[in-house]
Image (cartoon, rainbow, N blue to C red):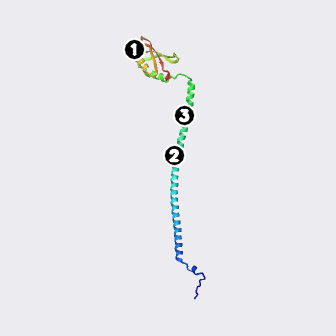
């Protein structure tokens, strides 16, 4: 049989393999534990990043829908502004055409509404009246009525109207119309300048 000879000095000859195996095992366990911790930390970070990514995608979707709504609203605002400018241009044309002419539609409509049944006009004329430094439109109406109370009611309605002021009875005469008693009258009043 072969016998082995160890030529190393005596202090180096004895090697305790248990310590070596123990330290190696500890290093391997420490290495594997470190790998496990790094792996779990990476997975946790990846999960958090994926959740954040999904949340950002949802937020981006919501923002995209809101952006579409806002763009639609902005388009409507732009259309409204364009229509407003168009209406202002048309109003400017109307103002240039009217060129300071008196707008009679509202006062005449009011006048037609307050004339009682049984009273009618035979003439209506207007003139400019100066009162100090202000100019007013004066109206003179002539007509007939079947009773004096109708004329009184008409004058009261003129005075109560927000369109007229300075109502005055210029003349009143008893007459006959188609075999009936009637009254011819002439009334003057002014149209308020704020309604013209």
The residue pinned by badge 1 equals 148
- Answer whether labels 3 and 2 touch (C-beta < 8 Å): no
Q: Residue 120 sits in which quadrant?
A: top left
Image coordinates of residue 125 in percent, x first then y, are: 50, 16
Q: Residue furthest top?
A: 174
Q: Residues within 10 Å of mark 3 (few under 14, many from 20)?
A: few
Residue 147 seen: no
Mark positioned earlier in the residue sequence (3 or 2): 2
Helix or strand or loop: what does disc 1 sit on? helix
Q: Residues within 10 Å of mark 2 (few under 14, many from 20)?
A: few
Pick the residue in front: 123 or 90: 90
At 41% from the left edge and 13% from the top edge, which residue is drawn?
183
The residue pinned by badge 3 equals 84
Separation of residues labelled 1 and 2 (CA atoms):
72 Å
Image coordinates of residue 169 in percent, x first then y, are: 44, 14
At 51% from the left edge and 64% from the top edge, which residue is drawn?
37
Helix or strand or loop: what does disc 3 sit on? helix
Mark positioned earlier in the residue sequence (1 or 3): 3
């Amino acid at each position: 049989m072969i016998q082995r000879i160890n030529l190393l000095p005596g202090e180096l000859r004895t090697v305790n393999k248990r310590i070596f195996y123990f330290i190696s095992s500890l290093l391997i366990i420490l290495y594997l534990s470190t790998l496990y911790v790094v792996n779990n930390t990476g997975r946790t970070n990846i999960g958090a990043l994926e959740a954040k990514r999904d949340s950002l995608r949802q937020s981006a979707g919501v923002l995209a829908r809101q952006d579409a709504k806002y763009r639609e609203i902005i388009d409507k605002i732009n259309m409204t502004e364009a229509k407003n400018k168009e209406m202002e241009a048309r109003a400017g044309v109307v103002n240039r055409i009217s060129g300071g002419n008196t707008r009679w539609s509202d006062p005449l409509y009011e006048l037609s509404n307050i004339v009682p049944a049984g009273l009618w006009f035979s003439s209506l004329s207007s003139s400019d009246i100066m009162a100090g430094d202000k100019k007013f439109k004066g109206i003179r109406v002539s007509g007939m009525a079947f009773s004096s109370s109708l004329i009184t009611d008409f004058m009261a309605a003129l005075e109560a109207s927000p369109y007229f002021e300075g109502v005055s009875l210029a003349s009143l005469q008893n007459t006959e119309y188609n075999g009936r008693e009637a009254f011819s009258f002439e009334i003057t009043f002014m149209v308020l300048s704020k309604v013209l």
